[in-house]
Amino acid sequence: GQQLNQSPQSMFIQEGEDVSMNCTSSSIFNTWLWYKQDPGEGPVLLIALYKAGELTSNGRLTAQFGITRKDSFLNISASIPSDVGIYFCAGQMSGGSYIPTFGRGTSLIVHP
Amino acid sequence: GAVVSQHPSRVICKSGTSVKIECRSLDFQATTMFWYRQFPKQSLMLMATSNEGSKATYEQGVEKDKFLINHASLTLSTLTVTSAHPEDSSFYICSAPAVEGRRAFFGQGTRLTVV
């Protein structure tokens, strides 16, 4: 199936640093979703974006829906050890079965 | 947010046996549920879309006779891995769309190990 281009693939950072990751697609999406997955668990929804240009925050997380509707980014400020995990973006079209297309994930490791 | 419960979280079975995985939407109704497979350090790959009251829709390359899906009610979908083999060992995750389908919520996942 179709995949989004998510980068970076992995990040190794120090506690307290800010993190930025993004997703790009050749297709236009009406919804962008950002998930975090801990080892052995299912993905947990972090932020949902429904409108081009939308900027939404959830605590230390901020995500934006790109103006072109083909990209989105997620920022994490002042990272902490519990931010460790794999972050997935997902693009979704409306008007159908709302099946999200997932990026390949960004693995985040935070060193104390 | 909406809650999707998946059971069991881990299962070990012998080669040749069948394993059933349940996915329940706990506080909302889901006419559609999705089943994914995830290999280590990989993204989620959609296997099939489960439709309440009708046949499931399988993605290309997924054997429908191997992975039986039953969406018996508005809150329950099951995935049965039939005649499991070691290569079927993987992490299986279900999800259900809520809030008018604009957001997908995931179950906890099932780690299947076939020995």
Image: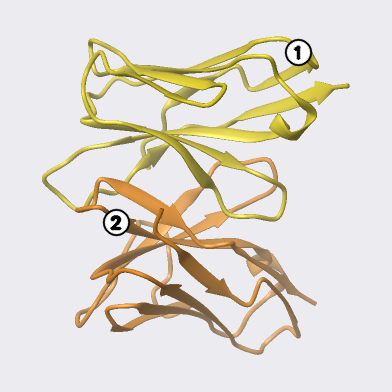
Q: Secondary structure at mark 2?
A: strand
Chain containing mark 1: A
Q: Which residue type does callout 2 highlight?
A: Ala
* Residue A13 makes an appearance in the image: yes
Q: Nearer the viewer, residue A81 or B101?
A: A81
Residue B87 placement (x, y as % from top left): 68, 65
Callout 1 crowding tier (Cα within 10 Å): few <14, some 14–19, many ≥20:
some
Q: Is residue A23 visible?
A: no
Vertical comparison of A95 with B60: above or below: above
In the image, B107 versus A61, the foreground residue is A61
Checking the image for residue B98, the label placed there is 2
**Image quadrant assignment for residue B49:** bottom left
**Residue at mark 2 to residue at mark 1: CA–CA distance:** 34 Å
Q: Disc 1 designates what residue?
A: A16
- The answer to which image quadrant residue B26 occupies is bottom left
In x, y percent, where is residue A64?
A: 37, 17
Dot 1 lies on which element? loop
Q: Which chain is orange?
A: B
> Residue A46 in the image: x percent, y percent?
48, 37
Q: Which chain is yellow?
A: A
Q: Residue at x 80, y 17 (%)?
A: A15
Q: Quadrant of the C terminus of chain B?
A: bottom right
Residue A59 horizontal side relative to residue B71, left or right: right
Residue under the point 72% across and 10% down: A17
* x and y, in percent, of residue B106 in the image: 47, 56
